[in-house]
Image (cartoon, coloured by chain):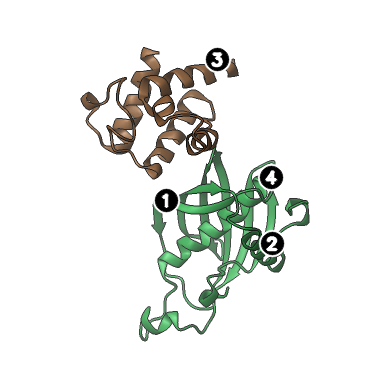
Amino acid sequence: MSSTFDTVAGIIAETCDIPREKITPESHAIDDLGIDSLDFLDIAFAIDKAFGIKVPLEQWTQEVNDGKATTEQYFVLMNLCSRIDDLVAAKA
Amino acid sequence: MRIESFLLIDRIAEIDLSAKTIRAEATIPTQSTIFDGHFPGFPLMPGVLLIESMAQTSGWLVIAATQFTRMPFFAAVNEAKLRSFVLPGASLALSAKLVHEGSGYAVTSAEIRAQGKLICSAELRFRLMPFPSPEFRASMEKVAAEIAFPVEAAPHG
């Protein structure tokens, strides 16, 4: 998870010009880091490329909109990284 | 090309879904009110419209790749380069490649050539969303037919 977090934090820092030290596993991408949906597309593209996966943004957004999930489940970075690890494992 | 209607592609020449590429053609009109201001006495096709024409070319590729289930909305343009002036009457060869189809977004690289010469290029990003209404989708299907969207990539059902 730590290497996943390091990669994701690096992507966010570079994509959104956020100081790396402000990005922690507990950071909420939207509420704490202020990442908007357009920037998140860039982040998703970089994550997809870096890990060879397809982050299911449409499904996650639908679940949040339907009240079946909270944004914390997908956009707090430790949770995001855990889901990335699951997607990588499922691909293997 | 019907600039005033914002229809910037005349014809789709080919969509290759295995290669994830599209080729399209367009001719800049010789007369348009656009040229009244851009520029008086020196008419040039505006660069933003060249970028939009690359976006429309890419958009049809995305629509084909998603089998008419998603509408691509232009979201970002990176590394746009406008290399040459484009004059009224010019014939354009537009092409795009689907670089990545993500969940809810797509990335393309696109370019335009005139007489074989590269005149502009960019990387484009799109949000992909369900068509907002059946009427919207029907209007896109109508445009698709007008620009020779290939039958094998047309919507089913």
**Could you tell me the amino acid type at mark 1?**
Ala
On screen, residue B133 versus residue B88, left or right, reads right
- The residue that mark 3 highlights is A89
Q: Residues within 10 Å of mark 4 (few under 14, many from 20)?
A: some
Nearer to me, A44 or B122: A44
At which x and y percent is residue B29? 54, 79
Residue that lies at the very extreme toward the front in this rendered image = A67
Left or right: residue B89 compared with residue A6: right
* x and y percentages locating residue B66 in the rendered image: 65, 45
Q: Are marks 3 and 2 on the same chain?
A: no
| Label 1 and label 4 in one chain | yes
- Asked if badges 4 and 3 are on one and the same chain, I answer no
**Residue labelled with disc 4:** B17
**Can you tell which quarter of the image residue B12 is in?**
bottom right
The residue beneath circle 1 is B76
**Chain identity for the colour green used in the image:** B
Callout in the foreground (1, 2): 2
Chain containing the residue with disc 4:
B
Which label is found at residue B141? 2
Q: Label 1 to label 3, Cα distance in Å?
A: 31 Å
Identified at 70% across, 60% down, the residue is B149
Q: Secondary structure at mark 1?
A: strand
Closer to the chain start, of discs 4 and 2, is 4
Dividing the image into 4 quarters, which one contains the N terminus of chain B?
A: bottom right
